[in-house]
Image: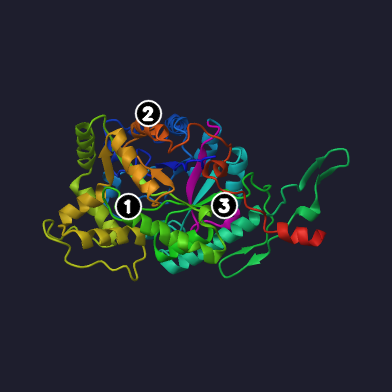
Amino acid sequence: MSKKQRQMALGAMMYFPAGEHISSWRHPESDAAGLMDFNYYKHIAQTAERGKFDMFFYADELYVWDRFESGVAQSNSIRPEPFTLLSALAAVTSRIGLAATVSTTYNEPYHIARKLATLDHLSGGRAGWNIVTSQTDEEARNFGLEQHPQHKDRYGRAREFVDVTQGLWDSWDDDALLFDKARGNFADPSKLHTLHHKSANFAVRGPLNVSRPPQGYPVLIQAGASEAGKELAAASAEVVFAPGSAFGPFGTVEDGKALYDDIKDRMAKYGRSRDDLKILPGVLPIIGRTEEEAKERLDAVNELTPERLGLDLLSHYLGRDISNYPLDEPLPYVPQLEGFNQSKSNLTRILQLLEREALTIRQLYKRVNSRGIAGTPTQIADQLEAWFLAGAADGFNVMFPHLPGGLDDFVDLVVPELQRRGLYRLDYTGATLRDHLGLKRPESRYANVQSQTKR
């Protein structure tokens, strides 16, 4: 019997509600006015489900980007709250996973354990959590701080946050609820566990007042590619949304494979198999029915961002205002990762880009803002297949230049091509997000203790 062909996983990502591109709201085909309309999100989630995507992934932030005037005047900072949105989408979808960004820096474990467990129950086991530590001082100032906590402190807190949250999800054994009306027994007290966690970061007694999630734990997702981020991923993540190695069309397969192997090679020391983690690089496809049409569409997307906004976005990534430097000359300094307290992944990609090419500031901000790969459906499928078969990806986190049309194009034009090649499912074969991703359901931390006690 021949071995079953390996198939890729796909996530449908929404970063800005109108699309991945910072100026997506300006695209002629975007529904810029629908950003707080549930029907807009319903169409997107149902289209992704029609395309048999593993999950709809909703990225979130906890601030308005008002560091620069252009952030308010020219880009979109409006977005609905994720748990409210995903709970509503659970009612109008039946198979697709529903994942969202939730910060471990500006939340508490009990809140998040309860919300995610509830979403997992209401969706029939389709919840996922993108674990982030947040990035900016703007977020800190919405939660009683003047400055964002230091990078190493955020990641230390994040690892403990995840452990506490999982402990709360284990509060009730899977068979703890009896519902024995005749005897009046609602639950078996011996199958309830109180966490009693106490540290410098958290004091959480427990137990959780929501029963154990259908998936055991909602799927844990992580996106950081710093050293601390890769260690967190190797220790506890089940999906990594890997960034490209550099801004621009996808980086190289070799770079992708290097990051893939780097993260997966760290897993053994945490007692984990490489198959326990799926790595999904981000890809922004701009699709045309011909090469010429694809290039025209890419050029149109790249022209959407005003120069002021493009420069301010680059300044944001660098953590330093560079708008007064001559635009047609290189950066007059070399950015340093050491001590940098925003997204080290973004800064690393900028440094990689500068090492490979001699770019002026004008060229750099345009490259930073141009991250799409343009091509026909066949050409897009070729690139995805190359990364997948080379062992640089387990699938892809697909982003869109504008919504909902960019997703419609991918589902109608690229998905059938991937299916024709046998690289992608023809239909769902399971009901939960773990089923889709081929991830095992985790046992409760108390399961081995109980089995030893019974002996």
Quadrant in the picture for the N terminus: top right
Q: Of helix, strand and loop, which one carries label 2?
A: helix
Asked if residue 343 can be seen in this view, the reply is no
Q: Amino acid at mark 3?
A: Ile
**Depth order, front residue of 5/169:** 5
- Quarter of the C terminus within the rendering: bottom right
Q: How many marks?
A: 3
| As drawn, 443 above or below 121 | below
Q: Residue at x 53, y 64 (%)?
A: 268
Q: Which mark is residue 253?
A: 1
Residue in the image at 44% along x and 60% along y: 263
324 or 253: nearer the eye? Answer: 253
SS at badge 3: helix
Under tag 1, what secondary structure?
helix
**Residue 39 against residue 122 in the figure, above or below:** above
Q: Which residues are magenta?
A: 93-111
Q: Residue at x 46, y 41 (%)?
A: 7
Task: Give how far apart the Cα atoms at labels 1 and 3 are.
Answer: 36 Å
What is the CA distance from the residue labelled 3 to the residue labelled 2? Answer: 36 Å
Say whether residue 434 is visible.
yes
Residue 198 falls left or right of residue 334: right
Per the image, the residue denoted by label 2 is: 412
According to the picture, the residue beneath numbered tag 3 turns out to be: 112
Q: Residue at x 17, y 57 (%)?
A: 361
